[in-house]
């Protein structure tokens, strides 16, 4: 059968910058659907498939194409490409390449998007189908897609559905008005409620299968906590569904999606990495949302199974054969990155810096781990050489987690989440590691005097009112009360600054409002670090040295003092808070042994956050 080479390319202008356009064109699941491709599914063609390759096919009822797909290659925000080798269908092979080229024209700045399809058609009929597919109508479709992306960028919204789908959705406008009205009444967030309902109403279904609250917060320029709280209300109203996504700590591909928190796993096998991975609450378990089926039913259609949209933290991925080298033009935003491969246990840490290297050569081969950090210019040229005896999938990855999802540790440490979903907790006997947690203990000063001076009934009321004040303030500072212990409370936060601010606000409120003979006065202990989350008494609780140390620190506090470790005081966010002009803070240093921690002396800081009253001296 004769083969027919072909090559089609188009250059389309966009008003957006390459960085603005990259999330759209690199989301090949969205892009392939928008340009009219059919849904795909994984196929079983051969058991000898090379590592990281995919075997795919279209729906058998639509087309019988079957192909083998190499790993995607991309450099954000410059280009992406993928090569397909077909076993059946109109093509023998196909290369798809999309390139974003900044337009320096001052009159009409933006980006030229180069879209290229080249390959080999199988026989005369395959050539005919190729010519029919890549017609003038296909170019017009591409222009329309890019125009939709431009409108989405300008309006800070996801691209809307195609016109035909949009007309169908307009048949029942009253339904959407009623949903918006209910969500607004429940959340008291009219603008966010409107945006969420419009998202469900007008957006393509691919954007509703995994709704990222962090993405909505950035896209709409709303604080993350307000987006989350409005989404919680939408879940309660059966407008959204809440799910827990668990990702591999090494490659960050999705391993499992669970409807309830007690369904999550402490470990899971990653097919890509070929190993069982330990999972935690901090980074590898994240909260996501999707459209509730009663509001909008979603199909299971996929248009891509392994594109850049599955790994947004990866700024570059290349598949390099043994002995080959690859030239990379890096544009690294501020952050911390690592160069890693799929098989060599040897990550290289890099960081952009204006004093960094402009040109660098990296040789990939088996060797000892490098614990250092290489400084690179934010715009640098890199040559990557594969000295191994097998192909390598190399990537440059952002090492930060907080920019790519909202962790379970963050939401479960929020009072509002616990109040909305009291049955969201771990399985009995299950424990999950939770890093970077701030634990605050507060206790009443001389509570026995409150009871003796006020009587039991009045004293109990004052103590319970004090719990309610703390609960309200801790909730506003996006922490959570884990439990009460007598007159004391244990609370958790994500950042030490939030805990200190909550303690200072509560202390000030009690000073200003309680002028009785037996006033409410606090002392506190605070520590930050790792611990384990468990379920105890049908709620999430925490155990470990971080909790124990915070409990011992409160014992060292005097009246109106907050005691914390010297290490916690070095936290940059806490330092910023304490340096504010309206923040009074007197710090005393001392060292002390702590019960349960042996003979070790701990460096401790006493914080007095209430400004003493002025005294008139005559």
Image (cartoon, helix red, strand yellow):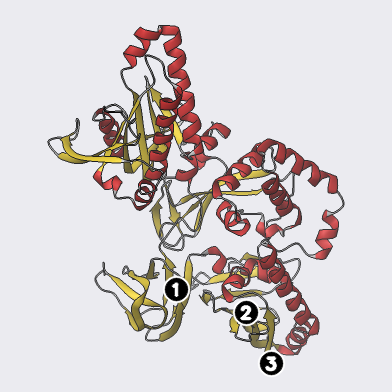
Label 1: which secondary element: loop
Q: Which numbered circle lies on residue 86?
A: 2
Which residue occupies 56% across, 72% down? 19
Q: Which numbered circle lies on residue 281?
A: none
Q: Residue furthest right?
A: 171
Q: What is the spatial separation of the Cα atoms under label 3 and label 2, in whole angstroms? A: 14 Å
Which residue occupies 59% across, 52% down? 222
Location of mark 3 (residue): 4
Label 1: how many residues lie within 10 Å, few (<14), some (14-19) or many (20+)? many
The image position of residue 13, as x and y in percent, is 69, 82
Q: What is the spatial separation of the Cα atoms under label 2 and label 1, in whole angstroms? A: 35 Å
Viewer-proximal residue among 347 and 256: 347
Viewer-proximal residue among 44 and 114: 114
- Relative placement, left or right, of 279 versus 300 is left
Label 3: which secondary element: strand
**471 to 264, vertically: above or below:** above
The image position of residue 131, as x and y in percent, is 76, 87
Label 2: how many residues lie within 10 Å, few (<14), some (14-19) or many (20+)? many
Location of mark 1 (residue): 332
The image position of residue 602, as x and y in percent, is 18, 40
């Amino acid at each position: 059968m004769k083969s027919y080479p072909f090559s089609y390319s188009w250059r389309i202008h966009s008003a957006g910058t390459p960085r603005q356009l990259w999330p759209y064109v690199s989301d090949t699941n969205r892009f392939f659907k928008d340009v009219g491709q059919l849904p795909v599914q994984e196929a079983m063609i051969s058991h000898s498939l090379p590592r990281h390759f995919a075997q795919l096919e279209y729906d058998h009822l639509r087309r019988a194409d079957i192909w083998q797909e190499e790993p995607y290659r991309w450099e954000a925000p410059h280009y992406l490409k993928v090569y397909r080798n077909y076993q059946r269908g109109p093509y023998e092979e196909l290369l798809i390449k999309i390139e974003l080229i900044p337009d320096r024209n001052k009159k009409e700045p933006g980006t030229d998007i180069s879209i290229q399809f080249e390959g080999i058609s199988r026989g005369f009929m395959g050539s005919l189908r190729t010519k029919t597919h890549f017609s003038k109508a296909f170019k017009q479709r591409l222009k329309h897609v890019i125009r939709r992306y431009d409108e989405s960028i300008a309006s800070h919204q996801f691209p809307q559905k195609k016109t035909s789908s949009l007309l169908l959705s307009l048949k029942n406008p009253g339904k959407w008005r009623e949903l918006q009205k209910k969500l607004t009444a429940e959340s008291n967030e009219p603008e966010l409620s409107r945006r969420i309902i419009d998202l469900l109403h007008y957006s393509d279904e691919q954007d509703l299968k995994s709704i990222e609250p962090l993405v909505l917060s950035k896209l709409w320029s709303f604080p993350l906590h307000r987006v989350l709280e409005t989404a919680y209300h939408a879940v309660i109203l059966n407008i959204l569904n809440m799910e827990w996504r668990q990702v591999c700590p090494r490659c960050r591909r999705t391993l499992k999606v669970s409807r309830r928190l007690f369904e999550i796993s402490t470990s899971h096998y990653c097919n890509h990495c070929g190993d069982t991975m330990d999972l935690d609450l901090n980074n590898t378990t994240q909260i996501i949302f999707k459209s509730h089926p009663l509001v909008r039913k979603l199909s299971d259609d996929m248009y891509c199974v392994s594109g850049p949209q599955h790994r947004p933290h990866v700024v570059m991925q290349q598949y390099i054969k043994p002995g080959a080298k690859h030239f990379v033009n890096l544009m690294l935003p501020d952050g911390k990155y690592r160069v890693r491969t799929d098989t060599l246990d040897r990550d290289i840490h890099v960081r952009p810096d204006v004093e960094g290297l402009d040109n660098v050569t990296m040789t990939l081969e088996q060797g000892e781990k490098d614990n250092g950090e290489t400084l690179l210019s934010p715009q640098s040229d890199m040559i990557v050489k594969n000295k191994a005896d097998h192909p390598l999938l190399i990537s440059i990855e952002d090492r930060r987690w907080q920019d790519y999802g909202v962790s379970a540790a963050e939401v479960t440490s929020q009072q509002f989440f616990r109040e909305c979903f009291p049955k969201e907790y771990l399985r009995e006997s299950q424990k999950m590691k939770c890093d970077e947690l701030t634990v605050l203990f507060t206790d009443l000063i001389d509570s026995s005097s409150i009871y003796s001076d006020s009587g039991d009934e009045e004293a109990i009321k004052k103590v319970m009112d004090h719990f309610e004040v703390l609960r309200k303030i801790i909730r506003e500072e996006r922490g959570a009360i884990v439990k009460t212990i007598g007159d004391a409370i244990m609370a958790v936060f994500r950042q030490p600054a939030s805990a200190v601010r909550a303690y200072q606000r509560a202390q000030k409120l009690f000073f200003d409002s309680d002028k009785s003979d037996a006033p409410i006065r606090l002392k506190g202990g605070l520590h930050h670090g790792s611990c384990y989350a468990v379920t105890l008494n049908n709620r999430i609780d925490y155990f470990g040295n971080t909790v124990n140390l915070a409990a011992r620190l409160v014992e060292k506090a005097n009246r109106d003092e907050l005691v914390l470790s010297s290490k916690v005081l070095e936290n940059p966010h806490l330092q910023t808070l304490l340096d504010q002009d309206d923040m009074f803070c007197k710090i005393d240093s001392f060292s002390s042994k702590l019960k349960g921690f042996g003979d070790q002396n701990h460096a401790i800081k006493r914080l007095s956050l209430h400004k003493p009253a002025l005294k008139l001296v005559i």
